[in-house]
Image (cartoon, rainbow, N blue to C red):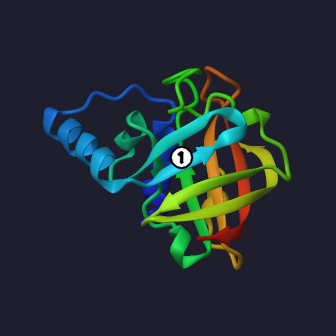
Amino acid sequence: MWQFQAKRAISALGSDVLLSSDERVDLEEKVEQEGSRLVINKIGVNMPLIESESENALLYGAWRAPGTSTPDKGSNTAIFGHRYLNIPPSKNTLFRLNEVKVGDTFEVIWQDETYTYKITEKFVVEPNQMEVLDPTDKSVVTLITCTPLFTTKQRLVVRGELVSNN
């Protein structure tokens, strides 16, 4: 099941989606209520992290792929985000994700705790390479967006390992 949802997510990174008014209201309420965030200070990112069964959550911020882990449980938390829907100076975009480097850090605020991750890998995959979503032994976050800019040709993947939480 999670692989099907992940395939939908990866394809949604490049699609134009029309939302029903009910779905729009539901997603807007989730953004306001949940309080989870993805923060990458180096590139000016501070975006809502949305829990939803629908990949349309990407229209409102970062989306934790259903079926992947969560920061409090360890393993692999996969987070998708648009790169071109919003552009800087908006903080709600992964537009500049290509600028992060191995060794940089980012944070995920999850259920009132801040989890800090150190980037250990940065690479490009084809849209059908689902193994980046597989569970891991270590507590990691895998960030996924389209690349090159303004295309859906491939996926830029940035993976960070947990270094602290408080």
Give amino acid for label 1: Phe
Q: Position of residue 160 (x, y in %)?
A: 73, 59
Closer to the camera in the image, 15 or 52: 52
Q: Vertically, is 150 above or below 22?
A: above
Q: Closest to the observer: 140 or 105?
A: 105
Q: Is residue 128 visible?
A: no
Q: Quadrant of residue 139?
A: bottom right
- Whether residue 44 sits left or right of residue 57 in the image: it is right
Residue drawn at x 35%, y 40% is 56
- Judged from this view, the residue extending furthest toward the front is 166
Residue 123 location in percent, x, y? 79, 46
Where residue 120 sits, quadrant-wise, is bottom right
In the displayed structure, 142 sits above or below 113; it is above
Regarding residue 25, the answer to whether it shows in the image is yes
> On screen, 77 above or below 101?
below
Question: Residue at left 70%, top 79%?
Answer: 137
The quarter of the picture where the C terminus appears is bottom right
Pointer 1: residues within 10 angstroms few (<14), some, or many (20+)?
A: many
**Residue corresponding to mark 1:** 80
Q: Is residue 42 left or right of residue 90?
A: right
